[in-house]
Image (tube, helix red, strand yellow):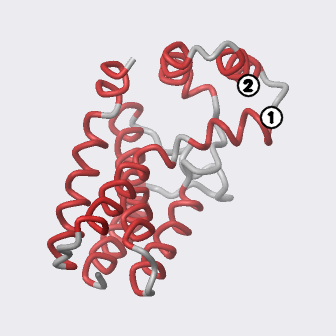
Amino acid sequence: MLKKIFDLYKLPLIIAVFVCVAIIALTMESNPLQIAFIVLGAFAGIFFLDLDYVLHTYFLEPASDFSKSFQGFMHHKDFNGLVNYIHYHRNELKEKTLNSAIFQLVLGGASILVVSSTASNFAKALVISAFINSMYRMAEQHFEYKDLNDWFWAFKTKPDRGGIVVYCSILVAVLVLSFSLL
């Protein structure tokens, strides 16, 4: 099961390592406990967006086929099967709450707010890691399907190519600002 998780989350793990190194270097943290909090927060950020499947299953649409299968895997404690099921059926959910442009904008604002406050290192690493991973998931969807309509499901009109470039530029600017505020 760990091998399967590692295969699915290879690049997000590399992103988490980057976030750890960047935060430790920018904050010049030397306390081992604080470094551990940074590492835990960065690695928790990898899986933060996967809470979308739990939200969908237990709160938004518990009667859907996806939700029933998810609940079945959870009931039988078949976590390996659950990971495989989510991986192969992740595109069945069209209106994902956490994997969307609206939540990404909220997460970007939260990263600026959390980083500029006196929040714990865990919270800073978690928010930045989740934000970068949301950017990665958006890029992954674009390169895999050449379409980001599912990402902008909450918008009345979907942005054109130029709008997506502006949107991505804003995301990168927010990321740079977040790291500069550390």
What is the C-alpha distance between the residues marked 2 and 1?
A: 7 Å
Task: Judge by depth and name the residue closer to the eye, 78 or 134.
Answer: 78
**Can you say whether 62 is above or below 72 in the image?**
below
Horizontal and vertical percent position of residue 98: 58, 51
Q: Residue furthest right?
A: 63
Residue at image position (26%, 34%) is 10
Residue that numbered label 2 is attached to:
67
**Can you say whether 45 is above or below 10 in the image?**
below
Q: Which mark is residue 61?
A: 1
What count of labels does the image hold?
A: 2
Horizontal and vertical percent position of residue 172: 31, 68
- Please state if 115 lies on the left or on the right of 21 as rendered: right
**Can you say whether 47 is above or below 76 in the image?**
below
What quarter of the picture does the C terminus occupy? bottom left
Kind of residue at badge 2: Ser
Q: Which mark is residue 4?
A: none
Q: Earlier in the sequence, mark 2 or mark 1?
A: 1
- Please state if 110 lies on the left or on the right of 16 as rendered: right
Disc 2 crowd, CA 10 A, few/some/many (<14, 14-19, 20+): many
Horizontal and vertical percent position of residue 157: 63, 57
Whether pointer 2 and pointer 1 mark residues with C-beta atoms closer than 8 Å, the reply is yes
Kind of residue at badge 1: Glu
- Please state if 41 lies on the left or on the right of 110 as rendered: left
Disc 1 crowd, CA 10 A, few/some/many (<14, 14-19, 20+): few
Mark 2, secondary structure of its residue: helix
What quarter of the picture does the N terminus occupy? top left
Residue at image position (54%, 48%) is 99
Residue at image position (41%, 59%) is 164
Horizontal and vertical percent position of residue 22: 19, 66
**Can you say whether 17 is above or below 21 in the image?**
above
Mark 1, secondary structure of its residue: loop
